[in-house]
Amino acid sequence: MTNQGRSFNTPTILEIGEGVIQQLEVLLKKYELKNIILFLDDYTNEHFAPGILESFTTVKIEMEVLPSKMDIHELISIAFQMSSYDAVLALGGGAIIDFGKYIAFARKLPFISIPTSASNDGFASSSCSLQVNNKKTTVPAKIPFGIIVDLGIIRTAPKPLILAGVGDLMSNITALYDWSFEEKHGVGNVDAFAAMLSKKGVNSFVRTPMSDVKDPIFLKELVSSMTMGGIATEISGTSAPISGSEHLISHALDKISNNPQMHGVQVGIATYVMALVQDHRYERLRKVFQRTGFFDYVKTLSLDKEEYKQAIDLAPLIKPTRHTYLHEEVYREKAKSMLDEDLVLCEIFGR
């Protein structure tokens, strides 16, 4: 497919359902992937590796456990020291998925993403969050060739991980508004199809029953909507369909906070702040965060209001080439004032 003369990819394999991990070899054989390497973290190696190994009969599979912290130079070294394979797979949380994705990208191999939680949309995106010279950096890669999400595995993840995923997904709302804002100020152009896909994903999710975040229907909608956002980034060639000012606040918090929280948690809080600033769909966000228990959870974290204010001021420096709402002082001041004035935020941060 092409978009204004530029080609883009979509996942060839997309399986979301109960027990799909047991169909892994069948899916690989279908696409003639006969010799693969599977990267795991310590947890997935202990809990899932034996079962996966036993389920393979004809496809050759090699497994390698990677440490939880690696920089881009170590990943490149692994990529070019490993043997030749038909595909790279990664099973685990956000870090191991990003590691596998980048190793596959470096070797120009198909990558299959098998997340064990839905805490963020990285499993479906075309970029990685990696350490580059001791700095967390968003690095381009390729959208996965395959995405395999076993809802039975996702459901076993702690509830806060699922709530983090809710926070990350709902940021599409403010990110899309930032993207339009940028275009109006002559900074980039909105890709209408990518924007539509991102918007449809989050709109589908907000209509889902939310009384139980571990319900298979809820989880399938969450994962499916995240996948649509990931594809939107591939179509547009930018993270703008799913990442705006709210993500800049989170990235700033990663730099300055004494106790940084999960990416999706920080993004979710910042999304609510920015929706108030943008005066756009904040009531919908409030309802989703109340019904899922997101707000109840973040109230237990003893968050530092002053750190969030500092992060708001630092946000434009994270990506100076963009022009989100926070790149204008008037909106930074409004964002900081919301932390003192909005009743929900006062409950989260304390007066």
Image: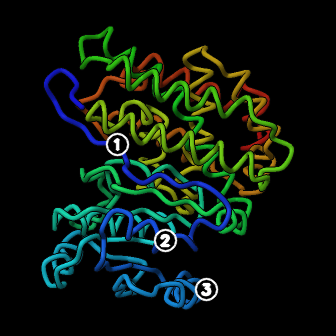
- Per the image, the residue denoted by label 3 is 47
The picture places residue 183, in percent across and down from the top left corner, at: 31, 13
Identify which residue, 260 or 87, lies in the foreground.
87
What distance separates the C-alpha of mark 3 from that of mark 2? Answer: 16 Å
The picture places residue 313, in percent across and down from the top left corner, at: 43, 35
Q: Residue at x 47, y 52 (%)?
A: 14
Quarter in which the N terminus is drawn: top left
Identify which residue, 172 or 295, lies in the foreground.
172
Q: Which color scheme does this rendered protein use?
A: rainbow
For this view, does 148 lie left or right of residue 86?
Answer: right
The picture places residue 279, in percent across and down from the top left corner, at: 60, 14
Q: Nearer the viewer, mark 3 or mark 2?
A: 2
Quarter in which the C terminus is drawn: top right
Lower sequence index among marks 2 and 1: 1
- Per the image, the residue denoted by label 2 is 24
For this view, does 139 lie left or right of residue 83?
Answer: right
What distance separates the C-alpha of mark 2 from that of mark 1? Answer: 19 Å
**Relative to 129, residue 85 above or below:** below
Identify which residue, 118 or 271, lies in the foreground.
118
For label 3, the SS is helix
Q: Amino acid at mark 3?
A: His
- Per the image, the residue denoted by label 1 is 10
For label 2, the SS is helix
